[in-house]
Image: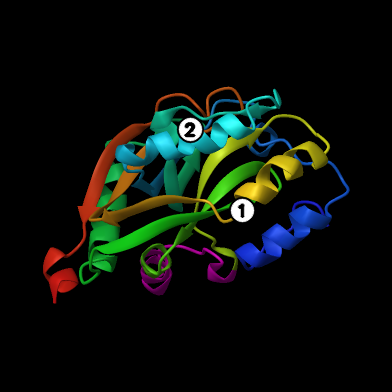
Amino acid sequence: MPGRFFTSFDEAWSFFLDREEPLEDFFAQFPEDDSYLLGWLIRFDESLVAAVREVQDAFSHLDWIVRPPERFLHTWLAGVVLAPRSPSKDEIANAAERAARAWASEPSFDVTYRGINCFHTGVVVEVVGDGPRSLVERLNDSGQQGIRIETFLPHLTIGALRGANDPAPLREVLVPLHDFGLGAQTVTEATLCVVPASQATILRSWDFVGSVALSQAQRLR
């Protein structure tokens, strides 16, 4: 069923390998009118960008795949506010305060970027490690979010699909790269950002408006 939510990366990969219907438009999932999303993410280590470019070069001949700019590379955690206007200072401050309480005892952690996959609307790298899920679970436990943890698959989007296209040419590219590893990074904070979340603006610059530091001491023990 197109658009279904996957419960594992293996499920997503199997679906992609067998897929006959066209891939879906990344940009169509966002509103046409001006819209802004306030949410939490993990910023990508810029030292690993060269590895991302290596994978992107492999599908560069497919002109219906948009390579997101370096500033876009991230692991999304949770949205807080979606509105037709930019969030207010109070909304930003409240989101930062609530998350700081939820993550007060959360340690820093390592993640590994390993496994090239494809969702309905994008080429992604699997993010391996329990840290992102733990952050989302803490938000859920605090009653601040309603994220379906069973379909939360932390990932790095490296190719945004434009329009409905045959998956076969992309399959030829990604199958040999499926086990490719980009490297690892240590995550010491989660970042709050304002995303211009319309179809025309989603890849524009995002404003980083806050952060919550994770405990260094706990990680060292």
Q: Is residue 70 magenta?
A: no
Give the amino acid type for the residue marked by disc 1 in the picture.
Answer: His
Quadrant including the C terminus: bottom left
Q: Is residue 137 magenta?
A: yes
Q: Residue at x 64, y 32 (%)?
A: 59
Q: Quadrant of residue 217?
A: bottom left
Q: At numbered mark 2, what does the secondary structure look like: helix, strand or loop? A: helix
Q: Position of residue 197 (x, y in %)?
A: 52, 33
Q: Residues within 10 Å of mark 2 (few under 14, many from 20)?
A: some
Q: Quadrant of residue 219?
A: bottom left
Query: Cα distance, mark 1 to mark 2?
Result: 15 Å
Q: Are marks 1 and 2 in contact (CB under 8 Å)?
A: no
Q: Position of residue 11 (x, y in %)?
A: 69, 65
Q: At numbered mark 1, what does the secondary structure look like: helix, strand or loop? A: loop
Q: Which mark is residue 178?
A: 1
Q: Which residue is mark 2?
A: 53
Q: Which residues are magenta?
A: 135-150
| N-terminal label among 1 and 2 | 2
| Left or right for 217, reference 119 | left
Q: Which colour assignment does the render follow?
A: rainbow
* Residue placed most toward the observer, 97 or 218: 218
Residue 75 to residue 7: above or below:
above
| Left or right for 203, reference 183 | right
Give the amino acid type for the residue marked by disc 2 in the picture.
Answer: Arg
Residue 198 to residue 112: above or below:
above
* Residue placed most toward the observer, 104 or 82: 104
* Residue placed most toward the observer, 79 or 47: 47
Q: Is residue 5 visible?
A: no
Quadrant including the N terminus: bottom right
Residue 62 to residue 173: above or below:
above
Q: Residue at x 69, y 50 (%)?
A: 175
